[in-house]
Image (cartoon, rainbow, N blue to C red):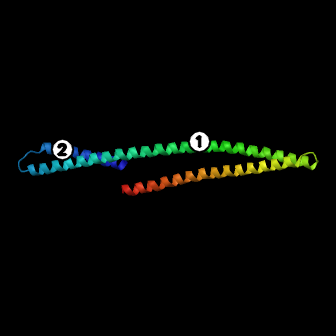
């Protein structure tokens, strides 16, 4: 974009010089040349205006894309923070469940515990492990979706660069 701004500056300077030169000239023989130069001046002004308009559009598009990326990053960060909190709570519950089951097994070995309670505790532990696995899978899906979004943005950026060229 700095190249466009530099071209605009150079075009504006050239247009000013042409305008000053046209004002300094006066003569019937040069009238056609003056008219041609004025037409060139007008063409350059039109080209400059078009470049400025294109630059404004590109800046607006870039700002919109940046805002979208920031919002997406923020949403993903919140989602990951929540998932991390849930995952930590689930892991703590699994640790406690395993400790309880170990105590039940020890009590059963001493002939104190009811085997039915041990069976229920083992079923609960299996369910907790399944939930833990589901949480891990969900976490992996979040990561994969974020990677997919990043790759899509990268592909979109290449397409935009190709269109501009």
**What residue is pinned by disc 2?**
19
Horizontal and vertical percent for residue 46?
24, 47
**Which residue is at a point 5% across and 48% down the rendered structure image?**
28
Residue 28 placement, left or right of 139: left
Residue 85 placement, left or right of 34: right
**What residue is pinned by disc 1?**
78
Horizontal and vertical percent for residue 50?
28, 47
**Secondary structure beneath disc 2?**
helix
Horizontal and vertical percent for residue 31?
9, 49
**Which residue is at a point 49% across and 54% down the rendered structure image?**
152
**Secondary structure beneath disc 1?**
helix
Residue 162: tell me if it is visible: yes
Foreground: disc 1 or disc 2: 1
**Which residue is at a point 65% across and 52% down the rendered structure image?**
137
Locate the C terminus by quadrant.
bottom left
Q: CA distance from mark 1 to mark 2?
A: 59 Å
Nearest to the observer: residue 80 or residue 48: 80
């Amino acid at each position: 974009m700095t190249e466009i701004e530099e071209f605009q500056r150079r075009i504006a300077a050239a247009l000013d010089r042409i305008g000053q030169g046209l004002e300094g000239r006066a003569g019937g023989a040069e009238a056609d040349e003056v008219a041609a130069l004025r037409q060139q001046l007008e063409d350059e002004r039109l080209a400059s205006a078009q470049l400025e308009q294109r630059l404004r559009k590109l800046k607006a598009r870039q700002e919109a894309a940046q805002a979208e990326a920031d919002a997406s990053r923020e949403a993903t960060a919140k989602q990951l923070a929540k998932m991390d909190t849930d995952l930590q709570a689930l892991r703590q519950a699994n640790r406690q469940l395993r400790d309880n089951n170990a105590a039940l097994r020890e009590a059963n070995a001493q002939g104190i515990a009811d085997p039915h309670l041990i069976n229920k505790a083992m079923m609960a532990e299996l369910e907790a492990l399944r939930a833990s696995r589901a949480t891990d899978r969900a976490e992996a899906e979040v990561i994969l979706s974020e990677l997919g979004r990043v790759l899509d943005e990268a592909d979109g950026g290449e397409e935009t660069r190709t269109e501009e060229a």
